[in-house]
């Protein structure tokens, strides 16, 4: 068995192994805005739901490994304290890949990716039209896990409003996973797709 000591292993090697091992990871496509009104859009696979009451999501913009800089998403949400987390489906995969590029500050990733901004109802950042589920959120807390390259920043947000496209609902009004067509992140260049063939159910209790 291969054993890795995290204290003596390079950050790049740790990233490779951990991204491969802790997967699949859901993807949150996060839109933010700065005080000047410049919009940013970026996908995060360090993302998940952590509470229902209150409804809380967490995503983590890590410090970039090559140069230890922080992401524009983190800078924006520190300034404005609002975001929209847009769920990512298979039909959006090419656009989210483009949105993940490292663009100069104040470049609008909506324009670069070809995704469509639509106004939110409670927060200033726009929603993504192509996303079937959009979560309008306000900032609760940011927990910085370090100041070294690769360190995460836990952005804890309160979900204030949920928008769901009726095309992904079943006859009872619940979300139908066979219609949602989600994707998730693996290691390297790998993704996975939630298809009807890959789904199974298991009753609890």
Image (cartoon, rainbow, N blue to C red):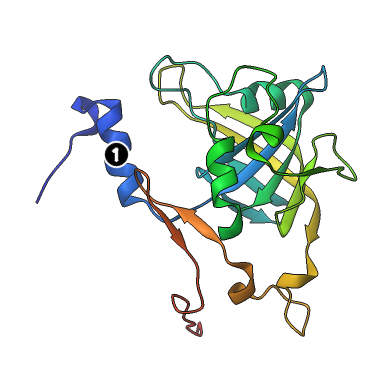
Q: Nearer the viewer, residue 164 or 91?
A: 91
59 shown above or below 21:
above
Left/right of residue 49 with respect to residue 195 in the rendered view: right
> Please, which residue is most extreme toward the left here?
1
Whether residue 205 is situated above or below residue 115 in the rendered picture? below
Q: In the rendered view, does 197 fall on the left or right side of 96?
A: left
Q: Secondary structure at mark 1?
A: helix
Depth order, front residue of 130/42: 130
Residue at the far right: name it: 121
Residue 150 x, y percent position in the rendering: 41, 26
Q: Let me know if residue 160 appears in the view.
A: yes
- The image shows residue 106 at horizontal and vertical percentages of 70, 19
Asked if residue 139 lies left or right of residue 200, the reply is: right
The location of residue 5, given as percent across then percent down, is 18, 34
Judge whether 89 appears above or below 181 on screen: above
Residue at image coords 80%, 39%: 126
Identify the residue at horizontal 44%, vertical 16% (top origin).
68
Whether residue 89 is visible here, answered yes or no, is no
From the image, tell me which residue sits under label 1. 16
Q: Position of residue 127 (x, y in %)?
A: 78, 45
* Quadrant in the picture for residue 118: top right
Q: In the rendered image of this protein, does residue 64 appear above or below residue 200?
A: above
């Amino acid at each position: 068995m291969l054993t890795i000591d995290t204290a003596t292993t390079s950050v790049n090697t740790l990233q490779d192994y951990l991204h491969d091992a802790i997967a699949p990871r859901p993807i949150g496509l996060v839109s933010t805005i700065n005080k000047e009104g410049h919009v940013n859009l970026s996908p995060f696979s360090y993302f998940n739901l952590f509470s229902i009451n209150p409804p809380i999501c967490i995503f983590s913009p890590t410090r970039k490994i090559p140069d230890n800089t922080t992401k524009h998403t983190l800078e924006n949400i520190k300034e404005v304290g609002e975001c929209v987390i847009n769920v990512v489906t298979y039909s959006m995969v090419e656009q989210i890949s483009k949105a993940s590029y490292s663009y100069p500050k104040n470049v609008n990733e909506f324009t670069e990716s070809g995704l469509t901004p639509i106004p939110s109802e409670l927060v200033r950042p726009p929603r993504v039209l192509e996303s079937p589920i959009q979560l309008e959120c306000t900032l609760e807390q940011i927990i910085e896990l370090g100041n070294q390259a690769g360190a995460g920043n836990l952005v804890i947000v309160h979900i204030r409003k949920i928008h769901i496209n009726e095309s992904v609902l079943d006859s009872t009004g619940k979300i139908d996973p066979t219609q949602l067509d989600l994707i998730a992140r693996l290691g390297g260049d790998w993704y996975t797709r939630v298809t009807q063939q890959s789904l199974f159910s298991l009753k609890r209790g």
